[in-house]
Image (cartoon, grey):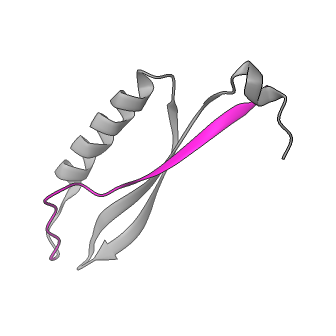
Amino acid sequence: MNYTYKTCILSPAGLHVSGDDQSVKLADSLEKKSNELGKRGWHLVSVTPTLNSGGSVSKLLLTFCKRAEQSDKNKEF
């Protein structure tokens, strides 16, 4: 079975980091992005913090996957 992967950086607008706990804002943004891509068949497989500032995570690298389309299965890398 072949898969297609998509990565994106999640950095919520208006996020001000100065040691404050930003978990709620990040969780809301993650849920919104996951639901948006989930409606198109993408499944979230990985979340990696990519930027720490003032003791708080302010950016996340998200990795999604879905089964490859038939036309993608015939491509070689």
Residue 14 colored in magenta in the image: yes
Numbered marks: total:
0
**Is residue 64 left or right of 76 when viewed as pictured?**
left
- At x 51%, y 31%, the residue is 43
Counting from the top left corner in percent of width and height, residue 51 is at 37, 71
- At x 70%, y 32%, the residue is 3
**Is residue 3 left or right of 29 when viewed as pictured?**
right
**Is residue 77 left or right of 51 when viewed as pictured?**
right
Using the image as rendered, state which of residue 10 and residue 53 is in the foreground. Answer: 10
Q: Residue furthest bottom?
A: 54
Using the image as rendered, state which of residue 9 and residue 54 is in the foreground. Answer: 9
Q: Quadrant of residue 71?
A: top right
Using the image as rendered, state which of residue 19 and residue 6 is in the foreground. Answer: 6
Magenta residues, as a range? 1-18
Counting from the top left corner in percent of width and height, residue 54 is at 23, 80
- At x 17%, y 71%, the residue is 17
Q: Quadrant of residue 75?
A: top right
Residue 15 colored in magenta in the image: yes
